């Protein structure tokens, strides 16, 4: 595995921290999750969390002197650490960055928060939608006139949080292996979700994108949205380039329709959206999907995870798998050195206590 030989200690938390640790485990790192001793899973979460797949579990009470010593011994063996408490909590427990670096100078200390380690909101509560709303990342989510709303967790917790934490940890570990000195990674969902906007901001530079919703190339045109079909399903359309737009019109029999000739005429977008909505409402989603499949029209059905699992695309890629009674996505990205992947079962709390303690000489 690509991260074989890397050890990550994860202090049990919620959302993006555990996801980042799962990503590291998927890539072959030895991830030891420190579950709360006597703790219970968060309401709505399973006892064996999918986010714990591939990890080993030890149950500790970080307020207990003996268990805290076990934690310090774990820190001494680790390349990286992940925690997702509010700022100051780890310091209060006596295991903040300064204390951990005294034990292991090369440790990369990964901190996952919504608002960051400092600033006026650093100690305030919040959730995915709050962070990305204030960062600007939620502004273009949804059609003009609708309240902005993004797919839950994807833009904030995962995109702006977990992925940036994972990249930060890996970059820090690379540096530490050459210098012998670790660092602190301040991964804030607020920061990461804003950083992801920079692709759009390149269009802003040229004036092709502006703050008015529904007037931009990716959030306003009739050729960049989803449409409801006759059976209640949805089809997505995003044929940005002229040649793809031409292929789209050709398959719909609209190539000679003068109304659709001016692809980038903003004034015509609302009317053409209504016309396409009426067209797509005449047939079921899968009929439209079959018409466009494999073409350059840039049209695809909107599938739920179970439908995605059963689609021919997944049969070829094996992206969705059913394992241990749970539908789950396989690790990504893929590497030329991969030899196949079998979904590991997530551990119970403290399942590897004896094994890990023995490794530590306890």
Image (spheres, helix red, strand yellow):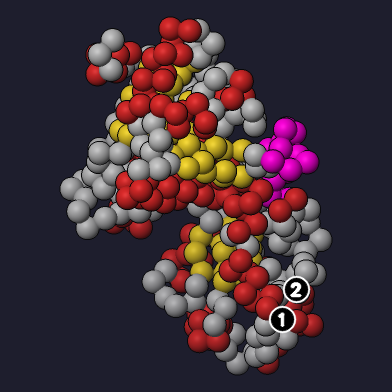
Q: Is residue 319 left or right of residue 279?
A: left
Q: Is residue 203 visible?
A: yes
Mark 1 and mark 2 in contact? Answer it, CB < 8 Å: yes
Q: Is residue 22 left or right of residue 188?
A: left
Q: Is residue 311 above or below residue 249?
A: above
Seen at 44% across and 66% down, the residue is 290
Which residue range is magenta in the image?
118-133
User: Which quarter of the image is occupied by the N terminus?
Assistant: top left
The image quarter in which residue 58 lies: top left
Q: Where residue 207 is drawn, which disc sits there?
A: 1
Question: Mark 2 — residue?
Answer: 210
Given residues 194 and 222, the one toward you in this image is: 194
Q: In x, y percent, where is residue 50? A: 42, 31
For residue 191: magenta?
no
SS at mark 1 in the image: loop
SS at mark 2 in the image: loop
Given residues 247 and 340, the one toward you in this image is: 340
């Amino acid at each position: 595995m690509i991260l074989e030989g890397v050890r990550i200690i994860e202090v049990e938390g919620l959302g993006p921290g555990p996801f980042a640790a799962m990503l590291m485990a998927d890539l072959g790192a030895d991830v030891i999750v420190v579950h709360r001793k006597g703790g219970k899973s968060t309401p709505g979460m399973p006892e064996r969390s999918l986010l714990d797949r591939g990890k080993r579990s030890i149950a500790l009470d970080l307020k207990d002197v003996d268990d805290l010593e076990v934690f310090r011994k774990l820190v001494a063996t680790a390349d990286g650490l992940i925690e997702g408490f509010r700022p100051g909590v780890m310091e209060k427990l006596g295991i903040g960055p300064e204390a951990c670096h005294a034990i292991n100078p090369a440790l990369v200390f990964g901190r996952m928060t919504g608002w960051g380690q400092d600033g006026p909101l650093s100690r305030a509560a919040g959730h995915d939608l709050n962070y990305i709303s204030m960062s600007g990342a939620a502004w273009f989510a949804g059609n003009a006139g609708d309240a902005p709303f993004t797919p839950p967790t994807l833009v904030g917790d995962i995109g702006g949080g977990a992925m940036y934490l994972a990249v930060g940890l890996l970059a820090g570990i690379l540096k530490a292996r050459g210098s012998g000195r670790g660092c602190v990674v301040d991964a804030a969902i607020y920061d990461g979700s804003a950083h992801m906007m920079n692709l759009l901001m390149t269009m802003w530079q040229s004036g092709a994108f502006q703050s008015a919703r529904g007037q931009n190339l990716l959030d306003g045109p009739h050729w960049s949205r989803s449409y409801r079909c006759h059976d209640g399903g949805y089809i997505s359309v995003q044929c940005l380039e002229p040649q793809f737009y031409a292929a789209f019109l050709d398959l719909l029999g609209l190539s000679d329709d003068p109304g659709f000739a001016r692809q980038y005429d903003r004034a015509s977008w609302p009317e053409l959206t209504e016309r396409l909505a009426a067209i797509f409402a005449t047939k079921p989603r899968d009929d439209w999907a079959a018409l466009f499949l494999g073409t350059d029209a840039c049209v695809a059905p909107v599938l739920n995870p179970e439908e995605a699992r059963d689609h021919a695309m997944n049969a070829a890629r094996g992206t969705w798998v059913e394992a241990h009674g749970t539908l789950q996505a396989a690790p990504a990205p893929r590497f030329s050195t991969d030899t196949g992947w079998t979904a590991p079962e997530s551990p119970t709390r403290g399942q590897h206590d004896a094994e890990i303690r023995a490794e530590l000489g306890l």
